[in-house]
Amino acid sequence: MTIQDAVDRNIVSEEKKDEFAFIKASDVSFDIGSGAVSQLIREATYRLLRSPRPLYLSFRTQDKPLLLPLAYIKTYNRISYSNFTVRFYPNTIRLKANNVRMHSVSNITPNIWPISFGDETVNLVVLMGDVEVTARMEKRTARMLSCSLQNTIINATSKNYWMIDTLLLMASNPIQSYLQELICPSISKFISNIESATVMNMSLNEILPVHIRNAINTVDSSLFYRLTSITAEEKHILIVMQMGWKRPLERNEEISTNVTNINMKWDNEDRIVIWIDDTALTDFLNQIKWDFQWMEETIAVTSPVIPLSSREFLSTLCTSCYFLLNVWANGPPVLTATNNTVVLEKRDRLNLRVVNPDKNVTSVFVSMFLALTAELRPVIDSGTLRTLVQLLDTSVVMESGAFPPSWSFFVQDLIKEMITQMMWPEMRKQIEELTYSEGIRLAKSCGINPQNAEILIGEGRLGLSATLNLQSLQAEECIKDLKSALPNTAKLFPK
């Protein structure tokens, strides 16, 4: 079954406009199977629990107590479980964990004057055979339906003082009997207090490696986001978030969501489907400084990308000469998803120099600003991302060159004609040799199954569907595999 055929974009409401907004907020949605959510939570829990994290707490009767602290307690906790699963039903979420174990070792230093006690060590072990919580999701609110802690065992012992050990033993049995009544109300309160419209933010400097932070436009480039809706269905859950850059989302702003419905059978609960507005991608690209050089190539006068008549003419003048091509980005690209394709608008500054190695002379042949509009048709075929490319339009603005200024309009039209009619057909072959024939092979080390991954394109939205396999996730290996899979642009200009 092809998911793309089932895409139906439904705009619930128009977003409230704000003339003072830097960038209009966009939507990102995650449609995740119950198996995929279980994998994500298990992986996150594993990474959270595998290394110790300090937590400092202060318990006091009022802001400024009259007495000094009664005791100092340093606690070391270790939590483990044997299995964790998530199940989704219409408007309902069920979470279950097996063999949950918490082992706590506390060093207590009393500070009760004038009575003096030595330090004490308390061991606390809490075992729960099964922990199950069921919650109901209704629009942007949640409430707990049930909470169950089965086969609980509490064992608390003191190391140094028999009196404290006896008190702990006496307290363990009542606490064990009422553990569910003690813990479940706190869980219920936590679930009920979840506020989906809370605005949160994250700075790019917090997530980007140090060596590429200089590429960001501003030092305070921050992403503001909030959860707008959670919808639980049979076997999967749809989470929609609203995001924007530079300016906090207004709390009283009308929340709107662009919902993409996918009529698909969730026979694989490890699947995850991600949708993102094309405006969100463009907004992210706007955070980057697009003034870097991305190409430097030599083109022989006999290269097939040069029209035949020009090749013959140039070869008679200098057979050893070649062109030196430098291309810089000139502003961020713009992506638009429409008609099952992605339209790319890209602007570059191009400098083409003629080099005569025999005379050791270099001169500027042409320097210009080039704008290209291309149509991209990406697909994932057997684990390889392949893209067909079609040039839709091009615009040329001369900067300088080996021509009189009065020739500018003529040269602009001439170069545009050469690009679209003569150079592009040959370059398209070379481009699609890289982007389609070779493609970009997806890596298993990135935690997905490349064989059933799929690119989705809706009206104004781009999506990716894949099956998670986090057991094979190796972050560093994933980055290496992706780098090695990127095409070599040197092949665009054969000698």
Image (spheres, rainbow, N blue to C red):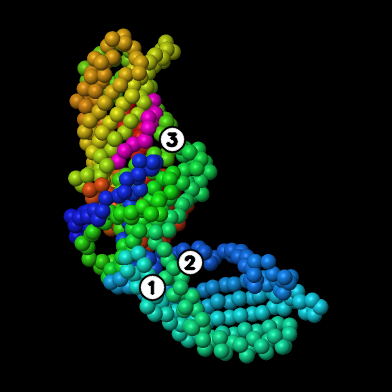
Amino acid on which the number 3 mark rests in the picture = Lys
Q: Which mark is residue 143?
A: 1
Q: Alpha-carbon neighbours of circle 2 within 10 Å: few (<14), some, or many (≥20)?
A: few
Q: What is the count of numbered marks?
A: 3
- Which quadrant would residue 339 be assigned to in this image? top left
Residues at marks 2 and 3, CA–CA distance in whole angstroms: 36 Å
Comparing 367 with 383, the one in front is 367
Q: Quarter of the image for the N terminus: give it.
A: bottom left
- Of marks 2 and 1, the one in the foreground: 1
Is mark 2 in CB contact (under 8 Å) with mark 3?
A: no
Comparing 456 with 205, the one in front is 205
Residue at 63% x, 89% y is: 169
On whether residue 276 falls in the magenta region, the answer is no
What residue is pinned by disc 3?
A: 289
Q: Which residues are drawn in magenta?
A: 325-335
Estimate the x, y position of residue 278 in percent, counting from the top left: 30, 45
Estimate the x, y position of residue 202 in percent, counting from the top left: 47, 51
Amino acid on which the number 2 mark rests in the picture = Thr
Q: Which mark is residue 470?
A: none
Secondary structure at badge 1 equals: strand
Residues at marks 2 and 1, CA–CA distance in whole angstroms: 23 Å
Q: Is residue 183 left or right of residue 339?
A: right
What residue is pinned by disc 2?
A: 45
Estimate the x, y position of residue 373 in percent, counting from the top left: 26, 33
Task: Please tell me which of labels 2 and 1 falls first in the chain.
Answer: 2
The vertical placement of 89 against 241, above or below, is below
Task: Please tell me which of labels 1 and 3 falls first in the chain.
Answer: 1
Residue at 69% x, 78% y is: 121
Secondary structure at badge 3 equals: loop
Q: Is residue 324 left or right of residue 219?
A: left
